[in-house]
Amino acid sequence: MESFNMLQKYEEFLEREYKAKLIENIRKGNNYIEIDFRKIAQFDVELSERLLDDPEESIKLIEEAAKDLMEMEGSLQALFFNLPESTKIPLNDISDQLDKFLTFEGYIMKPSEIYLKARSAKFECPSCSNVLNVLMIGREFKEPTNCGCGRKGKFNIIGRPKYVKFQKFDLVEAMDTVPERPRKLTNKSIYEIGRASCRERV
């Protein structure tokens, strides 16, 4: 399923299941939405499977769909609960399953300062004036590589990119979940392995 189709699907899902809650949260100044994973699975199995296999892209699309639905600027975070038991994993096994949606219990240590990370940007093709919307899926700021008119590279950025607040921290495994010394997950990996569940799980 292409990213654009996923974005449309998520917007349809959020409008059906969470629009009232989104309106209430935003009115209170809470720019987040807590989503029941089981509802996504009931709505579209392919979406739920994609969320588990490629959480970074899926979560960004969900958050973008929520913002589009609410016609809002700024950041909005998606949090999840009722994830499958198959996502639970001890920290010792995480290095073998990076980029998957995982859940675990632990303690947050050494939180960094909050800083901004590019979320999306618009570019104009100098050849045909087509506007290209680019979601910043990874950690690096990326420009589009080609346009439908055939042009490759050298596109003009339009306006300012959209940014989202970002924070790094260490996570130490809860002592009551392991028989030996708790393991620590360094902050260089925490973004990829379940940032959206932190409010619910730690």
Image: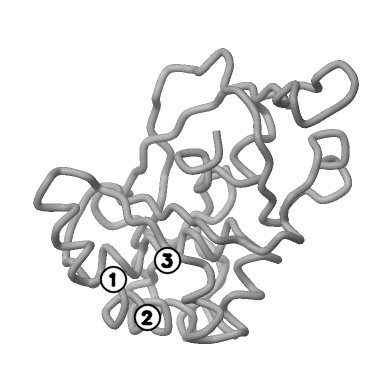
Which quarter of the rendered picture does the C terminus lie within?
A: top right
- Counting residues from the N terminus, which is met first, the one under dot 2 or under dot 1? 2
The residue mark sitting in front, 2 or 3, is 2
Q: Which residue type carries mark 1?
A: Tyr
User: Label 1 belongs to which residue?
Assistant: 18
Question: Which dot marks residue 161?
Answer: none
Q: Which of marks 3 and 1 is nearer the N terminus?
A: 1
Residue 113, compared with residue 44, is above or below; it is above
Which residue is the site of mark 3?
Answer: 62
Tag 3: amino acid:
Ile
Label pair 3/1, CB-CB below 8 angstroms: no
Q: Mark 2 belongs to which amino acid?
A: Phe
x and y, in percent, of residue 193 in the image: 66, 45
Q: Tell me if residue 134 comes above or below residue 12 in the rendering.
A: above
Q: How far apart are marks 3 and 1 (CA)?
A: 12 Å
Taking depth in this image into account, of 93 and 76 the one nearest to the observer is 93
Pick out the residue farthest to the top: 110
Tell me the CA gap for discs 2 and 1. 8 Å
- Element carrying mark 3: helix
- For label 1, the crowd category at 10 Å Cα-Cα, with few meaning under 14, some 14 to 19 and many 20 or more, is some
Give coordinates of residue 109: x percent, y percent. 58, 16
Spot occupied by residue 2 in the image (x, y as percentages of width and height): 56, 83
Residue, disc 2: 13
- In the orientation shown, which residue stands out farthest toward the left? 27
Which quarter of the figure has residue 130?
A: bottom left
